[in-house]
Amino acid sequence: MPYEVKDDRGEKVKVVPVPESAAFVLIGFHLLKQGQRTDHLAAQYINDPAGFWRVCDANNAMLPESLTEQQEIAIPNKY
């Protein structure tokens, strides 16, 4: 449900809250190797490279690039 807040200029702006993450089940963890990307992992484990956002969501990452420094990446179930 959108709500209004005042910005730095004092003007009212509408804000849409971030929805809660959907519940998911982890199928395991992947030891990240240099050069691997979240779309590669999504293609390998959930058969959908466009599902990279699921990998990000399972790891509480807003951007896929933020996962490049981690050693283990949580892998979610397909659905």
Image (cartoon, helix red, strand yellow):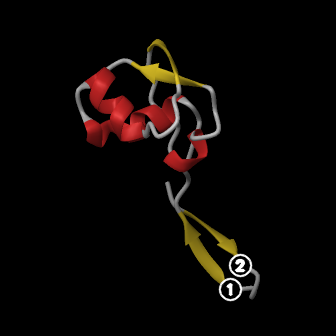
Q: Is residue 32 visible?
A: yes
Coordinates of residue 19 in the picture (x, y in percent): 50, 44
- The crowd level at tag 2 (other Cα within 10 Å; few <14, some 14-19, many 20+) is few
Q: Decide which of 62, 32 is in the foreground and name it.
A: 32
Neighbours of disc 1 within 10 Å: few (<14), some (14-19), many (20+): few
For image coordinates 75% across by 85% down, the residue present is 10
In the image, residue 63 sits, relative to residue 11, either above or below, namely above
Name the outermost residue toward the front.
34
Q: Is residue 7 left or right of residue 18?
A: right
Q: CA distance from mark 1 to mark 2?
A: 6 Å
Q: Is residue 2 above or below residue 8?
A: above
List x then y, in percent, for residue 58.
51, 29
Res 72 quadrant in image? top right
The quarter of the image holding the C terminus is top left
Query: Which residue is situated farthest in the top direction here?
Result: 27
Numbered circles on residues, count: 2
The numbered dot on residue 32 is none
Relative horizontal placement of residue 5, taking residue 56 as reference (left or right): right
Asked if one can make out residue 79 in the rendered structure from this viewpoint, the answer is no
13 in relation to 79, above or below: below
The answer to whether marks 1 and 2 mark residues whose Cβ atoms lie closer than 8 Å is yes
48 lies left or right of 57: left
Q: Nearer the viewer, residue 47 or 79?
A: 47
Q: Which residue is mark 1?
A: 11
Q: Position of residue 61 (x, y in %)?
A: 57, 41
Under mark 1, the amino acid is Glu
Q: Which residue is mark 2?
A: 7
Mark 2 residue element: loop
Residue for point 52% across, 60% down: 16
What kind of residue is marked 2? Asp
Residue at coordinates 49% horizontally, 38% vertically from top-left? 56
**Dot 1 lies on which element?**
loop
